[in-house]
Image: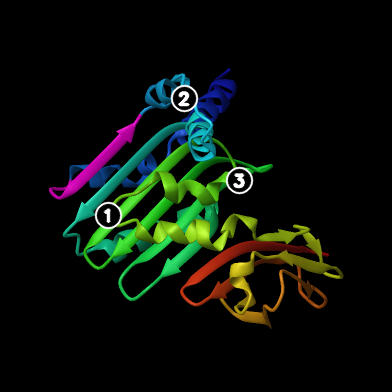
Amino acid sequence: MKYISLVVTSLLFISSIQSQNIIEQYYSHLKDMDDATTINISGKMFSMMASLEIETEDAEVKEALDFISSVTSFQLVSVDNFKDSKKERNRTADHMTQRYEELITVRDKENNLTIYIDEDGGIVDEIVGIVQAPENFVVFSLNGKIELSQVGKIAQYIQMEGLKEMDHVKKTEAQEVKVYPNPISSSGEINVNLSDYFIGGTATLYDLKGKEIKQISIDKNKHIIPAYGLTSGNYFLQIKKEDVSVKKKVIIVE
């Protein structure tokens, strides 16, 4: 009986952790800072917005309503005058890569934006955005049942200061980047599908220690990278052009 109780308690604990969004789990302490701004839109609000009877032939309006109907909650925390923004980002870097897939990273001289997704079978349960600037830190979590093909349009619906780099998500069509099959045999080939934006960039395969294994120049939408000679294990493929990169996990098996 004690063993069963322990198992049940453990399962309930794991379930509660998985149901929390990234802000509740790792960034709730930011809400109490002096220069923090918090936005929290509940599922009820999205349901009310989606249920509005709006008669329109405007394709963009219909698209926006469809998007809203797929969202269950949105939460954002922004902190100004935050000198430890880089340290805050690094604090959870490992947790992010273990729990989410990195969709896109945009780096310029001042800002660093990364969009992560929790996706399965083409449906995204959570979109997480983290922006780190010299004295500013922004994190948001968008939950729902969102089609992967619609993720690139989130920039249209999340417009605020500090998130201007969000436009890159749509411009680069990062959600269209595919790496398959995955896992892949060490005697097989890695297929890479790319959007037009990344033509002229590079695709680099790294091991988990960050050692470069292979690199190719991107000159078309589809490339094949031989996996011959790779030992079994986890790798990641970084597709990069200028300040924008997309990272995909690659699993090699015997």
Q: How is the image coloured?
A: rainbow
Q: Residues within 10 Å of mark 1 (few under 14, many from 20)?
A: few
Report the front residue among 167 and 108: 167
Which quadrant of the structure image shows residue 103? bottom right
Q: In the image, which disc is placed on residue 148?
A: 3
Up the image or down, 210 lies above or below 195; here it is: below
* Residues shaded magenta: 33-41
Count the marks.
3
Report if residue 208 is visible in the image: no
Does residue 142 appear to the left or right of 111 in the view shown? Answer: right
Measure the alpha-carbon separation of dots 1 and 2: 26 Å
User: Which mark identifies residue 161?
Assistant: 1
The quadrant of the rendering that contains the C terminus is bottom right
Percent of width and height locating residue 64: 48, 37
Residue type highlighted by circle 1: Glu
Q: Which mark is residue 50?
A: 2
Q: Is residue 54 above or below residue 99?
A: above
